[in-house]
């Protein structure tokens, strides 16, 4: 009801504005596309072929107004290496004749984006590296062929299936990867929505903080819960709606439940399964260090994993759809502006072997003559909304700091986007003292540099944009 009333009002406003603004007869235009990049079927390890998240896609939302064009591209992949990002972004920028900063290219960070039978991170180059540029260009070309008049809106909600994953083991008393319900996790669901002038959905862009790790090491190809979420949204609406997902500040955040995945891995070693939860890290370590080869689990357990992935996806998707329906700040004539800049922080080089000390004990590092670490930050302004990007996996509190600092603009945070800094995880200042696998594996020198400079850089970019749009308005 709220949505319907809002729509009528916005539609009337749109007509009024279009009639007055002769320099912009068309207003905002948007086109969307989805390209399948699922690995070929492995005849020795057939997919279940029962769940939507068994397919991997590259999706694009291309939008333009006043001769400015931008593209949001999302990939069902674990990550996108810096050089792959640069290649893909350069090709898309050339195709659209826009600056690279007008593009947001991100991965969902699914840990199931590998051909069947192979574990993620088991090869030097993860699946999808060579597919990204071609698929991104193809998706953008299709989207460009489907541009139509649109309005953009932004709204937020919340979902609670995530939890902090830095915990102290009750058995060893050492830091480990396990659910910690007293440590922070951001529950905000951020949603940018594109609709037609009559209110029908064209696209949504969501960010939320939760590692897609339920499919990790199961040996099956999966887009994990973001894949389930995006397909649920896409199938909820008539027509070819495209839903894209990017990670928020999820460096220290997992799903609250990994029981089904733990039992799936247990079934590979033909262990007895009680049905209860078992410490996931204890079970995962043997598969991760390859002392236990990945094997096809009992189908009973992989179906439980995949059904849980579906459930996680649906829970977040339903919140996204609710939030889309309650969006009421529709803009059919947004300014489009972008800028990127790197921040630089001191680095370190790890000398001890993480296979033997993943977490719990201090690592050994060389800090002499280590090159500073560059981290790319960016802002894509769309009217009174900004998408702020970080090319790395940041911790919850850094995300909160960014949200708190960004000045008077509707701020959507997307991480693991626009390149991949050589930093590894980026813990917040307070979390450096925790001997977790993220902290030990980070190539940054512990301290406040990353938290301070990332949030300051994004604040500066946001302020510059805000100044620009207020100058335009006052002219
Ligand atoms: C868009 O570009 C065209 C061609 O360069 C130009 O004629 C037109 O004035 C521009 N419109 C706006 C709103 O900047
Ligand atoms: C959760 O994390 C906090 C630090 O953020 C730590 O003090 C606490 O011991 C942890 N709790 C558990 C159960 O691991
Ligand atoms: C809105 O417009 C689209 C495109 O013209 C059309 O396909 C759709 O049926 C319309 N929806 C409603 C609710 O009017
Ligand atoms: C599983 O349980 C059965 C019955 O208690 C027992 O005989 C068997 O040794 C157990 N197998 C393993 C791998 O623990
Ligand atoms: C791999 O993990 C298993 C199970 O924890 C352990 O017994 C083994 O020593 C580990 N191997 C290496 C190389 O770390
Ligand atoms: C760490 O140890 C494992 C197991 O012995 C070995 O395979 C790996 O190459 C080592 N990694 C490094 C960086 O030395
Ligand atoms: C640390 O790095 C410096 C500079 O590359 C090098 O000279 C030194 O040998 C390294 N120290 C260790 C312990 O590897
Ligand atoms: C910015 O940082 C990225 C990511 O680390 C790096 O690849 C790139 O070269 C840097 N750009 C500049 C201009 O320093
Ligand atoms: C906005 O206007 C002020 C005052 O004229 C000027 O100093 C500033 O550079 C302008 N900012 C931008 C981003 O155009």
Image: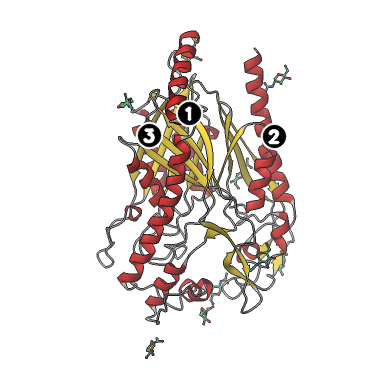
**Residue in the foreground of this view, choosing between 271 and 98:** 271
Label 1 crowding class (10 Å Cα cut-off): few <14, some 14-19, many 20+? Answer: many
Residue in the picture at 73% in, 61% down = 367
**Residue in the foreground of this view, choosing between 166 and 291:** 166
Which residue position holds label 1? 152
Residue 423, located in which quarter of the rendered image?
A: bottom right
Which residue position holds label 3? 32
Secondary structure of residue under mark 3: strand
Secondary structure of residue under mark 2: helix
**Residue in the foreground of this view, choosing between 238 and 227:** 238
Measured in 3D between alpha carbons, the distance from the residue under mark 2 to the one under mark 3, in whole angstroms, is 31 Å
Residue 262 higher or lower than 414, as above or below: below
User: Whole-percent x and y of residue 86?
Assistant: 51, 42
- Find out if the beta carbon at label 3 lies less than 8 Å from the nearest ligand 3 atom: no
- Find out if the beta carbon at label 2 lies less than 8 Å from the nearest ligand 9 atom: no
Which residue position holds label 2? 460
**Residue in the foreground of this view, choosing between 321 and 337:** 321
Measured in 3D between alpha carbons, the distance from the residue under mark 1 to the one under mark 2, in whole angstroms, is 24 Å
Question: Which one is earlier in the sequence, the residue at label 1 or at label 3?
Answer: 3
Question: Which one is earlier in the sequence, the residue at label 2 or at label 3?
Answer: 3
In the image, taking residue 300 as reference, residue 119 lies left or right, namely right
Residue in the picture at 66% in, 76% down = 173
In the image, taking residue 124 as reference, residue 51 lies left or right, namely left
Q: Quadrant of ligand 6?
A: bottom right
In the image, taking residue 451 as reference, residue 68 lies left or right, namely left
Label 2 crowding class (10 Å Cα cut-off): few <14, some 14-19, many 20+? Answer: some
Front disc: 1 or 2: 1
Residue 117 in sight:
no
Label 3 crowding class (10 Å Cα cut-off): few <14, some 14-19, many 20+? Answer: many
């Amino acid at each position: 009801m709220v949505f319907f009333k809002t729509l009528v009002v916005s539609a009337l406003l749109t007509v009024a504005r279009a009639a007055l603004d002769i320099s912009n007869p068309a207003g905002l235009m948007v086109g969307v596309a989805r390209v399948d990049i699922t690995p070929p079927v492995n005849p020795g390890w057939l997919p279940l072929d029962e769940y939507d998240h068994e397919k991997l896609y590259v999706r694009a939302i291309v939008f333009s107004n006043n001769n400015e064009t931008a593209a949001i591209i999302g990939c069902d992949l674990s990550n996108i290496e810096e050089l792959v990002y640069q290649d893909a972004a350069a090709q898309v920028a050339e195709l659209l004749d826009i600056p690279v900063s007008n593009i947001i290219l991100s991965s969902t960070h699914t840990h199931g984006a590998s051909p069947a039978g192979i574990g993620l991170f088991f090869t030097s180059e993860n699946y999808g590296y060579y597919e990204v540029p071609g698929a991104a260009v193809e998706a953008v070309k299709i989207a460009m062929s489907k541009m139509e008049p649109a309005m953009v809106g932004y709204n937020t909600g919340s979902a609670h299936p995530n939890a902090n994953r830095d915990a102290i083991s009750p058995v060893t008393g050492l830091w480990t990867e396990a659910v910690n319900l007293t440590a922070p996790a951001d529950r905000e669901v951020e949603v940018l929505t594109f609709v037609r002038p009559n209110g029908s959905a064209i696209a949504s862009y969501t960010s939320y903080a939760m590692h897609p790790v339920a499919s990790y090491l199961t040996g099956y190809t999966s887009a994990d819960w973001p894949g389930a979420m995006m397909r649920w949204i896409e199938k909820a609406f008539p027509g070819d709606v495209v839903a894209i997902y990017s990670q928020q500040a999820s460096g220290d955040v997992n799903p609250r439940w990994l029981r089904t995945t733990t039992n799936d891995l247990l079934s590979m070693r033909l262990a007895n399964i009680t049905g209860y939860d078992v410490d996931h890290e204890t079970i995962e370590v043997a598969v991760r260090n390859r002392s236990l080869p990945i094997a096809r689990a009992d189908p009973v357990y992989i179906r439980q994993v995949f059904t849980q992935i579906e459930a996680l996806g649906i829970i977040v998707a339903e919140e996204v759809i609710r939030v889309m329906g309650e969006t009421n700040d529709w803009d059919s004539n947004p300014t489009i502006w972008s800028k990127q800049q790197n921040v630089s922080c001191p680095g370190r080089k790890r000398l001890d072997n993480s296979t033997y000390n993943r977490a719990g004990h201090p690592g050994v590092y060389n800090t002499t003559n280590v090159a500073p670490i560059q981290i790319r930050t960016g802002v894509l302004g769309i009217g009174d909304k900004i998408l702020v990007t970080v090319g790395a996996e940041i911790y919850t509190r850094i995300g909160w700091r960014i949200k708190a600092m960004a000045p008077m603009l509707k701020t959507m945070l997307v991480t693991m986007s626009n390149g991949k800094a050589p930093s590894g995880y980026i813990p917040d200042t307070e979390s450096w003292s925790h001997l977790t696998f993220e902290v030990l594996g980070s190539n940054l020198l512990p301290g406040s540099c990353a938290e301070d400079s990332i949030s300051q850089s994004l604040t500066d970019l946001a302020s510059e944009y805000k100044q620009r749009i207020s100058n335009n308005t006052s002219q």
